[in-house]
């Protein structure tokens, strides 16, 4: 076990309870990302692909500003966004053995049913029964 990475941790029950508020926001994030991709905007570099200039109205597209607003809200709540393309998020959690792990949820899943270590990521997901 290493040092603790996240200041906020969720119980399984807390993470499940937050999902009702989170799901509509994740749907918006995924939609905004698709819209920005369609316009050729690279959200990770904050620029248009191919070197094109800003859209003329503002320096950043309004979709990016909304995406950042939602992402900051998630960060303030301690929720980790892992993939905007898939709607994948993690909730930091401390196991009974004091290991810090992630409770993992992906858009389309009914609830939080999986967890994984910080190092294995999505590929290392295990059912909550193994937590």
Image (cartoon, grey):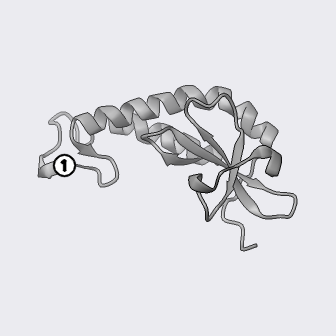
Q: Is residue 3 left or right of residue 58?
A: right
Image location (x, y in percent) of residue 9: 74, 52
**Residue at the farthest right position:** 96
Q: Quadrant of residue 3?
A: bottom right
Can you say whether 34 is above or below 91 in the image? above
Q: Nearer the viewer, residue 38 or 61?
A: 38
**Could you tell me which residue is drawn at 77 percent across and 45 percent down?**
128
Can you say whether 106 is above or below 9 in the image? above
Question: Is residue 11 visible in the rendered structure shown here?
Answer: no
Q: Is residue 13 left or right of residue 50?
A: right
Q: Quadrant of the N terminus?
A: bottom right
Q: Nearer the viewer, residue 46 or 86?
A: 86
Image location (x, y in percent) of residue 95: 82, 57
Dot 1: few (<14), some (14–19), or many (≥20) neighbours within 10 Å?
some
Q: Is residue 35 left or right of residue 1?
A: left
**Residue at the farthest bottom position:** 2
Count of labels shown? 1
Q: Is residue 78 left or right of residue 54?
A: right
At mark 1, the secondary structure is helix
Image location (x, y in percent) of residue 126: 71, 50
**Could you tell me which residue is drawn at 49 percent across and 37 percent down?**
70
Question: Is residue 74 visible in the rendered structure shown here?
Answer: yes
**Could you tell me which residue is drawn at 62 percent across and 47 percent down?**
90
**Could you tell me which residue is drawn at 53 percent across and 30 percent down?**
25
Which residue is under mark 1? 49
């Amino acid at each position: 076990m290493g040092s603790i990475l996240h200041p906020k941790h969720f119980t399984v029950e807390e993470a499940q309870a937050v999902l009702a508020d989170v799901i509509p926001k994740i749907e918006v994030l995924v939609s905004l990302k698709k819209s920005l991709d369609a316009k050729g905007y690279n959200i990770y570099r904050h620029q248009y692909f191919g070197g094109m200039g800003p859209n003329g109205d503002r320096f950043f597209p309004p979709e990016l500003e909304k995406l950042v607003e939602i992402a900051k809200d998630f960060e303030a709540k301690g929720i980790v966004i892992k993939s905007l393309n898939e709607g994948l998020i993690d909730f930091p959690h401390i196991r009974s053995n004091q290991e810090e792990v992630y409770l993992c949820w992906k858009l389309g899943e009914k609830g939080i049913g999986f967890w994984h270590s910080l190092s294995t990521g999505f590929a290392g997901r295990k059912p909550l029964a193994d937590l």
